[in-house]
Amino acid sequence: MSPEKRARALREAIERHNRLYYVEDAPQISDAEYDRLFQELQRLEEEHPALRTADSPTARVGGAPLPELQPVRHEIPMLSIRTETDTSDAGAVAFDNRMRRELGLERVQYAAEPKFDGLAVSLLYEGGRLERAATRGDGEVGEDVTHNVRTIRSVPLTLLARAPRRLEVRGEVYMDRRDFEKLNQRQQASGGKVFVNPRNAAAGAVRQLDPKLAAQRPLRFFAYGIGVTQGWQVPSTQSGVLDELERLGLPVSRERRVVEGAEGLIEYHRHMGERRRELPFDIDGVVYKVNSLEAQARLGFVAREPRWAVAHKYPAQEEMTEVLGIAVQVGRTGVLTPVAKLQPVFVGGVTVTNATLHNEDELRRKDVWVGDRVVVRRAGDVIPEIVGVSAPGPRRAQDRFEMPRTCPVCGSPTVRVEGEAATRCTGGLYCKAQRKQTLLHFAGRRAMDIEGLGEKVVDQLVEREIVANPADLYRLDAQTLSGLDRMGEKSAANLVESIGASRERTLPRFIYALGIPGVGEEVAKILARQFGSLEALMQADWAKAAQDKEAVRKENARRKKAGDPSLEVPFEGIGPELMESIQTFLHEPHNAQVIRRLLAEIRLSKPEPAGRAVEGKTFVLTGSLATMTRDEAQAALEQLGHKVASSVSRKTDYVVAGADAGSKLEKARELGVPVLDEKQLARLLGRI
């Protein structure tokens, strides 16, 4: 197949799978298979630039940032819908009475659909291709956001067959709750901005200048109507318009319905109210529209609002109350979260007495003090949170919250690592709040690799107070373990054997397993190389280490001017805040006691001398190996002083290819990088 035909086939397949996943909710391939198709198209377009098209799925990853958003005048104004303030059944009855009276009909048919809590946009298709996207703005003039809307995978770049010559589609860009929660978790972990609600996150993504940032946000789109059209036989009803948009490949709500009379409107409002928490996205009400487009034209507009439509809201999910106090909760990972104690308030269908403030930065940004009047939000099953301050309280010195310097659960010092928004307890090896997470991390595959010590087993060991810290694991016997639920004699014996096997581990693995705040696998390797033993690490003079690091940096600056080779900087990648975190954790008396107990049980193999890794080669692993896992192969190579990278480049020395090797193997062949099979790797590792 020629590159042109293959690129066309890939584009069609990717867009079809986008539609199946985002529009029809019926995916037919795995994420990995989708990624392979996408990467193949990217490679083809890189090799043959002439194959790139404006509607290619690869255009969704975003281009260069724009200097500013350009104004767009709507040919047909994008008007807002009047809101019915009466949230009871009477609101639906009043609207139906008005429509029957003005149309002179005994009975009126309506198109009913959810009222999405997102950002209204207009999509203009010319000849079936997306040419422009714009925000509503003031209804007359919006902003050109084509660069960002193109990154939304549920927005088709090309409509399906028999598309109108010109079609303006109107709808809502939104973010579903699950994606929003994941986004905020990522933001919190990276120290970024935590968003107040899905609507703000979606609106901010659409209206910023860099499409690469928009591509990273999990945005979606629903169509709810049309604007200007040419070359299209417009259906006679609102529901028919939505059916036709769906046929063209545009996502429309499956919760839409055609109903008759006030009783139909009331039933739909109640039905959606009951389903509201089950929906994957936020709605704050439903929308009723007279179904007949001819009747809509007769009714016309008043005060820039259509007479033929109304938004029937639900009771508010935001209310005001007073902050009575601010306490701290310690999570499973040791993160301290400030929580506001509130004057009880009924919001979102429940009485709320507590609301999260996320972290210290978010609390300072919102400037919440004890005694303030605040706006509290609750949507679905989301934990209630404070949106902002509506009226400041007396604001005495004692009313200002300060993050505690010691953990309220175990009394250990708290630290805040550079680059993180979270403040953490350093008593990870014995703090009761962190016990389960500490044990699971310690036993993890990349840490001590204790097979069989999963979440259900750990839950029982902690709840029955059999294990209080990682050192207690090495005192477990088969008889104790066989007393746990769903733990037979054989499983108990296997777990004891796995715990025994973990008594021999490398120093980097052990350092990582301790769960020191801010210390991941790479930092653990740096510490192991620099100190050579855990004893040296425990006794480290970090003030001197920081001075040595700075001295080497200054010497390197001098050498650079003289053209001399640079020295290797000690503790590269470890800043002063992280140094303080490591020192605090290791010197905490209870942690030190647990570590001493662990050292009595575990034999640590010594790492290679400092500098060996710099002299080694760079490897990339791809495919599955028969005699070892990829993690084991990586650890073995690193133990010999080599580096293992995640992607192939001209700096790669060797690619190790196992079964089902993919694009990395192809890239290696393109670049002429030597490829080793598993037998050659084993010989290099000294195993044969």
Image (cartoon, rainbow, N blue to C red):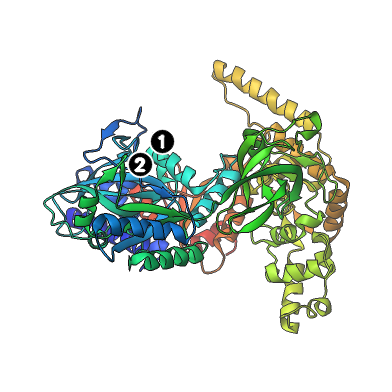
Tell me the distance, in whole angstroms, between the alpha carbons under discs 2 and 1.
Answer: 8 Å
Local SS, label 1: loop
Q: Work out whether residue 533 can be spotted.
A: yes
Residue located 68% across and 57% down the image: 447
Identity, as a three-letter code, of the amino acid under mark 2: Asn
Residue located 68% across and 63% down the image: 449
Q: Could you say where residue 338 lies in the image, as x and y percent from the top left? A: 71, 44
Say if mark 2 contacts mark 1, CB within 8 Å.
yes
Q: Which residue is mark 1?
A: 208
Q: Which mark is residue 138?
A: none
Q: Which residue is mark 2?
A: 148
**As drawn, 519 above or below 471:** above
Identity, as a three-letter code, of the amino acid under mark 1: Gln
Q: Residues within 10 Å of mark 2 (few under 14, many from 20)?
A: many
Which picture quadrant has residue 476? bottom right
Q: Residues within 10 Å of mark 1 (few under 14, many from 20)?
A: some
Which picture quadrant has residue 688? bottom right
Q: Could you say where residue 443 lies in the image, as x and y percent from the top left? A: 71, 62
- In the rendered view of the protein, which quadrant contains the N terminus? bottom left
Residue located 47% across and 46% down the image: 199
Residue 382 relative to residue 78: left or right: right
